[in-house]
Image (cartoon, helix red, strand yellow):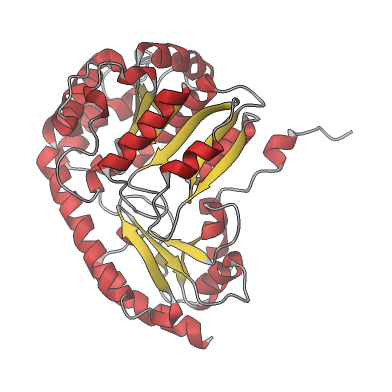
């Protein structure tokens, strides 16, 4: 008799990243692939981070469990970094270090929900958020963005029920790149407070957002921890995605409950990744700013490349690492367009159906994966698609 698997897991999509990369094995072209799939830094970490990793790997304690909430020095350094960025007064006790921001979301969402509860995701959503909540038996309700790819607070209020436990807002957005304005974030926070539910802000790409000043002022409210949870990643800021280091920023109750879940998954985040993040915070701040400038320069080049709508592909928004692009073939599914792009035009993208409840003829292009020469090449590849 065959073993039986979970219906919840069986109904999930496969990893869109893995599915996209599987297509590359079917290629017969010799031309170099333009890989706009996964949002990972295309550059190595700073010298300071590499030196810290090299030194730490020889220490006898590096292979041991780290303190479960995270290395005290990292929590303190990150609290100081947040206080500079948000003009706040956070302490290290408000921070839980996790094995990446994905895990930060998972342990937080699991601490907040039970099977049969509801959660609200702003669509387009980050696909792993949607997947994890489904695994947990939570019903996802989708707050669809309008033409400006920003959510409407009035529509949010209409989705909240007695079963709603959390709202998730990603800013800058993955996949749209859209930075949510401060005032809109505050409106969402107030709605969460009034309804006694959590607002989870995924701020993975906070360094790459548009605008000046603080991203929000939520941490200046003495009671912020009663309804606000902020998630962070060191992967993009310090080019260490494989070292798996992220963070939950929350009140005492959230940290306490999330620690219980973390204990069942990884016990603690890997010490070597925490050492890398600590080195970045202490010694690579100027490097970090330089990389942000480089990525924004790539975005400007990407905007120019897409301005003529090559091959009929129309850019709807961009920011952080991403371009959110409408494809021209309404007679094909977005998955079929992605397959043709990689096999015939040597362009690897992610179908928009990974981020939306229905097929809206969209693709996510991670322009930050490319170098300047590759972005210059992209319009010609897309123009080939129109003639294929």
Residue reaching furthest left?
A: 286
The single residue placed furthest to the right in the displayed view is 1
Position of residue 262 measured from the top left corner of the image (x, y, whole percent): 47, 19
**Is residue 239 something one can see in this rendering?**
no
Across the whole image, how many numbered discs are drawn on residues? 0
Specify the quadrant that holds the N terminus: top right
Q: Quadrant of the C terminus?
A: bottom right
- Percent from the top left, x then y, of residue 140? 59, 38
Q: Nearer the viewer, residue 211 or 301?
A: 211
Q: Could you tell me which residue is drawn at 35 percent across and 50 percent down?
A: 40
Residue nearest the viewer, comparing 362 with 267: 362
- Vertical side of 339 occupied by 255: above or below: above
| Drawn side of residue 154 relative to residue 318, left or right | right
Which residue does the image show at 59% across and 25% down from the upper left? Answer: 162
Up-down: is 141 above or below 72? Answer: below
Residue 357 showing in the rendered view: yes
Residue found at the very far bottom of the displayed protein: 387
Instruction: Write down the quadrant of residue 201 in the picture.
Output: top left
Q: Which percent across, then down, holds residue 104?
A: 42, 28
Tell me the quarter of the picture where residue 279 sits: top left
163 shown above or below 300: above
The image shows residue 383 at horizontal and vertical percentages of 42, 83
Taking 183 as reference, is 331 above or below it? below
Q: Nearer the viewer, residue 193 or 207?
A: 193
- In the image, taking residue 134 as reference, residue 259 lies left or right, namely left
């Amino acid at each position: 008799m065959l073993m039986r698997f979970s219906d919840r897991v069986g109904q999930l999509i496969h990893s869109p990243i893995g599915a996209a990369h599987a297509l590359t094995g079917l290629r017969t072209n010799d031309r170099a692939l333009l890989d706009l799939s996964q949002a990972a830094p295309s550059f190595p970490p700073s010298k300071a981070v590499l030196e810290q990793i090299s030194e730490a790997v020889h220490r006898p304690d590096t292979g041991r469990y780290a303190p479960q909430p995270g290395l005290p020095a990292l929590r303190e350094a990150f609290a100081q970094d947040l206080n500079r960025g948000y003009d706040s007064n956070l302490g290290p006790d408000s921070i839980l270090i996790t094995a990446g921001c994905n895990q930060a979301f998972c342990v937080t969402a699991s601490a907040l929900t039970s099977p049969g509860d509801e959660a609200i995701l702003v669509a387009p959503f980050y696909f792993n958020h949607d997947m994890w909540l489904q695994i947990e038996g939570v019903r996802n309700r989708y707050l669809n963005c309008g033409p400006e790819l920003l959510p409407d607070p009035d529509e949010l209020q209409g989705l909240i029920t007695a079963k709603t436990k959390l709202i998730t807002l990603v800013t800058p957005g993955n996949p749209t790149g859209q930075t949510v304005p401060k005032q809109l974030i505050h409106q969402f926070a107030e709605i969460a407070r009034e309804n006694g539910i959590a607002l989870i802000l995924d701020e993975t790409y906070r360094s790459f957002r548009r605008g000046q000043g603080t991203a929000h002022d939520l941490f200046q409210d003495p009671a912020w921890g009663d309804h606000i949870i902020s998630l962070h990643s060191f992967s993009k800021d310090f080019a260490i995605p494989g070292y798996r280091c992220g963070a939950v920023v929350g009140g005492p109750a959230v940290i306490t409950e999330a620690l219980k879940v973390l204990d069942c998954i990884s016990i603690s985040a890997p010490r070597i990744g925490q050492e890398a993040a600590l080195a970045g915070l202490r010694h690579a701040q100027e490097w970090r700013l330089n990389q942000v400038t480089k990525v924004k320069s790539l975005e400007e080049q990407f905007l120019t490349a897409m301005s003529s709508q090559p091959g009929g592909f129309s850019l709807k928004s961009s920011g952080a690492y991403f371009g959110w692009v409408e494809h021209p073939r309404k007679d094909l599914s977005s998955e079929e367009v992605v397959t043709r792009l990689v096999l015939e035009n040597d362009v690897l993208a992610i179908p928009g159906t990974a981020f939306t409840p229905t097929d809206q003829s969209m693709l996510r292009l991670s322009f930050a994966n490319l170098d300047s020469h590759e972005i210059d090449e992209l319009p010609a590849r897309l123009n080939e698609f129109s003639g294929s």
